[in-house]
Amino acid sequence: MPDLVETAANAGSFKTLVTVVEAAGLLDILKSPGPYTVLAPTDEAFAKIPSDTIASWLQDIPKLKKILTYHVLFGDVRTDNLVELDSVETVEGGIVGVEHSADGFKVNDAKVLQTDILADNGVIHIIDAVLMPALVSA
C-alpha cells in the first residue's frame, strides 16, 4: 500500500499540497512509519489563496512548516474517532476543532469532503480549505 505522500500524489487533486510539502522538507515525516492523519486541502482549496501569498510562504519555510504540520494529526484518526472528538492536537502543536453534524464533519471552518482514504502509514481526510494555525496570518 502506498504511503501518505504517494496516496495524495496518486489521487491527482493534491498537486499543490504535494508541492508545498516537498518545499517545506516534510516528505520524511509523511513517509515515516507514523501513523499520521493528514487533513488534506484540495488544489481548489489552495486556489482560494492568492498566489502571491503562497509564494511568500515558499520564501518562509518555518512559516510554511507551521501551516502544513497544522494539517497533520498524530495517529490513525478515522471517522469513528472523529465522531467522539470535539478537538484534536496537531503535529504543529495547535488544536483543531472537530464538528460533527448530519452534513458530515468540519475541522475548524473547513468541510471534510471525504474521509478515511487509507495509506500504508496513516489516513487522509480531504478538506475544502487551508487551515491556519493560531499566531500565523495568511
Image (tube, rainbow, N blue to C red):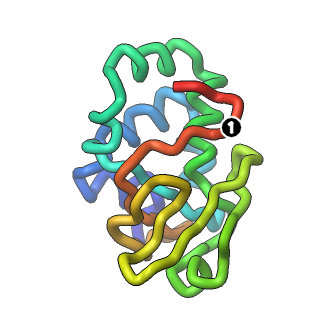
- At x 64%, y 34%, the residue is 66
Judge whether 103 appears above or below 136 on screen. Answer: below
Work out whether residue 126 can be spotted: yes
Q: Nearer the viewer, residue 104 or 45?
A: 104
Q: Nearer the viewer, residue 96 or 16?
A: 96
What residue occupies the far bottom of the structure in this picture?
80
Provide residue 80's location: percent of width, then percent of height: 55, 87
Residue 124 appears left or right of 63: left
- At x 27%, y 56%, the residue is 10
- At x 38%, y 34%, the residue is 19
Judge whether 118 appears above or below 71 on screen. Answer: below
- At x 62%, y 46%, the residue is 70
Q: Nearer the viewer, residue 107 or 29?
A: 107
Amino acid type for the residue under numbered disc 1: Ala
Provide residue 57's location: percent of width, then percent of height: 50, 20
Location of mark 1 (residue): 134
Judge whether 35 appears above or below 10 on screen. Answer: below
Q: Quadrant of residue 104?
A: bottom left
| Quarter placement of the N terminus | bottom left
Judge whether 78 appears above or below 61 on screen. Answer: below
For numbered disc 1, what is the local secondary structure? loop
Residue 128 appears left or right of 62: left
Work out whether residue 33 can be spotted: no
Provide residue 16's location: percent of width, then percent of height: 33, 37
Provide residue 68's location: percent of width, then percent of height: 56, 40
Q: Nearer the viewer, residue 77 or 109?
A: 109
Mark 1 crowd level (few <14, some 14–19, many ≥20, 10 Å Cα): few
What residue occupies the far front of the structure in this picture?
102
Q: Total marks drawn?
A: 1
